[in-house]
Image (spheres, helix red, strand yellow):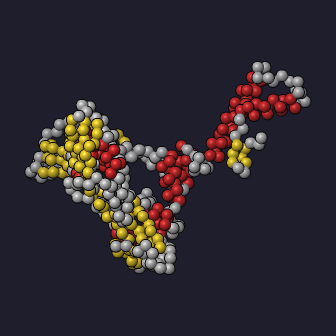
């Protein structure tokens, strides 16, 4: 059998074949001859086994080097290097971030490093990033960002980060008025492979994938940070199709329930990515600047958030945690990140409540697009819309078993 770098790929030479090759070379050597005893139990055979093991490690190293050039096979450091060649970096872990609101008496300062933990969860601690001061002569509310002391996603719904680790004179209360922004763990190999593929589609192409990748390229274009999703629809025909004019693209961006990216920044990214002669379509008109400094009109649309309400009645056992209601709300909101046009499947969100310890059943589960929903069916999200979930729109009633 042939080993090495073949047209069909790299074939590693196994230890048994290496040992046999050494034995055959010894028998073929005039100084030793075919009667040379190199059986595995002989002194020569034992030496051969030692040498062969070292040679086998070199073959294994060769296989790793070959795999390091294949983005689907490379792993660990090899994949990190391969991705960096394409301009994709392995993302470091990020802690969950929350905006805290402090009620302070006159002249009080909450120092950077002040610790506040989630209600009834002393292990979920947030550290204030910078000083928060009340410079006035009367009591008031002042805000500052805090990072969780552990990296990765941590559930902290609105109103639950409210317990200082240590007392502070003049601090009357503290809470988070909105849900925390979840952090993330370090990129695993699967995530890095996808980031590399996205990076390769960046500037230099005018395909749908390239336009989408450009809009999501906040690493190289921080002005676009906040765009969580971009959908690009094209009409390449000579007639109207799917509601689009001939030879046009319709870009739909999602930059949050409240727009967080400037219209002109989005327009500029679209203009620089699309092919010449292709018109843009959408409900939002903005302007990009061409290479001559002239303003060019660019149309696009923003995904319309559809607020979703939930009402649950759950039966719970004695082991239901004290913060179980908050955990249920966080489970429903954080279990899935909805994309543009994705329907809300009732059974999936109902099952989220069962992930919380102590929950026996969810006998009542209703959802809808208005407060106090009574429907139990899936919610249809139209094209150009995105389901918006928030713990403030979830009502949970707990009934003991």
State the image coordinates of residue 143 (x, y, percent, origin top left): 21, 51
Nearer-the-camera pick, 274 or 164: 274
Q: Quadrant of residue 212?
A: bottom left
State the image coordinates of residue 295 (x, y, percent, origin top left): 39, 78
Q: Is residue 53 visible?
A: yes
State the image coordinates of residue 209 (x, y, percent, origin top left): 49, 63
Image vertical order of residue 337 relative to residue 236, above or below: above
State the image coordinates of residue 50 (x, y, percent, origin top left): 71, 26
Residue for point 46% across, 71% down: 234
Residue for point 22% across, 51% down: 392
Image vertical order of residue 269 relative to residue 85, above or below: below
Residue for point 90% across, 30% down: 30
Nearer-the-camera pick, 235 or 66: 235
Q: Is residue 345 left or right of residue 325?
A: right
Quadrant occupied by the N terminus: top right
Image vertical order of residue 338 relative to residue 251, above or below: above
Farthest residue, direction right: 30
Nearer-the-camera pick, 56 or 283: 283
Quadrant occupied by the C terminus: top left
């Amino acid at each position: 059998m042939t080993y090495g770098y073949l047209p069909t790929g790299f074939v590693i030479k196994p230890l048994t074949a290496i040992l046999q090759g050494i034995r055959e070379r010894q028998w073929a050597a005039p100084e030793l001859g075919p009667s040379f005893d190199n059986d595995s139990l002989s002194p020569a055979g034992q030496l051969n086994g030692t040498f062969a093991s070292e040679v086998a490690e070199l073959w294994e190293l060769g296989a790793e080097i070959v795999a390091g050039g294949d983005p689907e096979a490379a792993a660990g450091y090899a994949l990190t290097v391969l991705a960096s060649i394409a301009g994709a970096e392995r993302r470091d872990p990020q802690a969950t971030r929350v905006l805290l609101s402090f009620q302070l008496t006159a002249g009080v300062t909450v120092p950077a490093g002040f610790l506040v933990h989630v209600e009834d969860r002393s292990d979920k601690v947030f550290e204030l990033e910078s000083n928060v001061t009340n410079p006035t002569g009367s009591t008031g509310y002042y805000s500052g960002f805090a990072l969780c002391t552990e990296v990765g996603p941590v559930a902290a719904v609105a109103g639950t980060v409210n317990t200082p680790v240590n007392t502070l004179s003049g601090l009357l209360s503290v809470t988070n008025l909105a849900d925390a922004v979840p952090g993330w763990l370090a990129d695993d190999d699967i995530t890095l492979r996808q980031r590399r593929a996205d990076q390769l589609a960046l500037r230099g192409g005018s395909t749908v994938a390239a336009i989408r990748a450009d809009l999501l390229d906040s690493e190289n274009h921080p002005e676009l940070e906040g765009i969580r999703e971009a959908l690009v629809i094209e009409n390449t025909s000579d007639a109207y199709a799917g509601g689009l004019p001939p030879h046009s693209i319709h870009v739909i961006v999602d930059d949050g329930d409240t727009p967080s990216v400037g219209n002109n920044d989005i327009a500029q990214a679209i203009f620089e990515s699309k092919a010449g002669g292709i018109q843009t379509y959408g409900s939002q008109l903005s302007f990009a600047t061409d290479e001559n400094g002239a303003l060019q009109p660019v149309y696009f649309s923003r995904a319309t958030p559809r607020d979703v309400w939930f009402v649950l009645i759950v039966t719970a056992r004695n082991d239901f945690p004290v913060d179980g209601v908050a955990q249920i709300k966080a489970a429903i909101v954080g279990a899935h990140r909805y994309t543009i046009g994705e329907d809300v499947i009732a059974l999936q969100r109902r099952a989220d409540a069962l992930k919380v310890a102590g929950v026996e059943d969810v006998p009542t589960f209703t959802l809808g697009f208005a407060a106090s929903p009574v429907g139990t069916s899936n919610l249809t999200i139209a094209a150009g819309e995105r389901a918006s979930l928030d713990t403030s729109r979830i009502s949970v009633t707990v009934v003991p078993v």
